[in-house]
Amino acid sequence: MTNFVWTLRVYWEDTDAGGVVFYANYLKFFERARTEWLRSLGVEQQVLADEAGVVFIVRSTAVDYNAPARLDDQLEIRTRIDRVGPASVQFAQEAWRGETLLASGQIRVGCVDRSTFRPSPIPAPVLATIKTAR
């Protein structure tokens, strides 16, 4: 499934009162992995915002939870592109602890004008980079 893998450690701040990763934190983990994936391709989001005037926003998410992660677990976030459009990217992402799938998600990200938050085409050089990384 993997185009990109990013690892992280679970900290106290990631867990709930039951000592497991709070369900919404998987969305944070997925976001960080997508950001690191872009960075690995040479795309810095702040530069994109400053120079091209566009930012990526999450348009929709759907996450399934299979097993809990706990404090100090080492996780692997696996990211794959399912679809690329002129102004959006559909990702499949999974959180793994060793051989155990913890959570899987479908995340649709859109490119918008930084000032108006209206849809905007992904800048051509970035789009070409994303398509090549598929």
Image: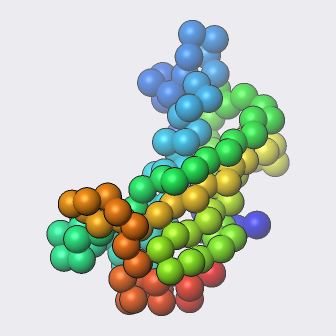
Q: Residue at x 62, y 63 (%)?
A: 91
The furthest residue to the top: 17
Drawn side of residue 31 relative to residue 62, left or right:
left
At a point 36% along the width and 82% down the height, the residue shown is: 123
**For this view, does 56 lie left or right of residue 95?**
left
Where 92 falls versus 71 (above or below)? below
Q: Quadrant of the C terminus?
A: bottom right
Q: How many marks can you see?
A: 0
Q: Residue 95 or 104: which is nearer the viewer?
A: 104
Q: Quadrant of residue 125?
A: bottom left
Q: Position of residue 17 (x, y in %)?
A: 57, 10
Residue at (56, 69) in percent of width and height = 89
Q: Nearer the viewer, residue 95 or 47?
A: 47
x%, y% of residue 95?
A: 67, 47
Residue 78 in percent (x, y) is at 65, 59
Q: Could you tell me if residue 47 is visible in this image?
A: no
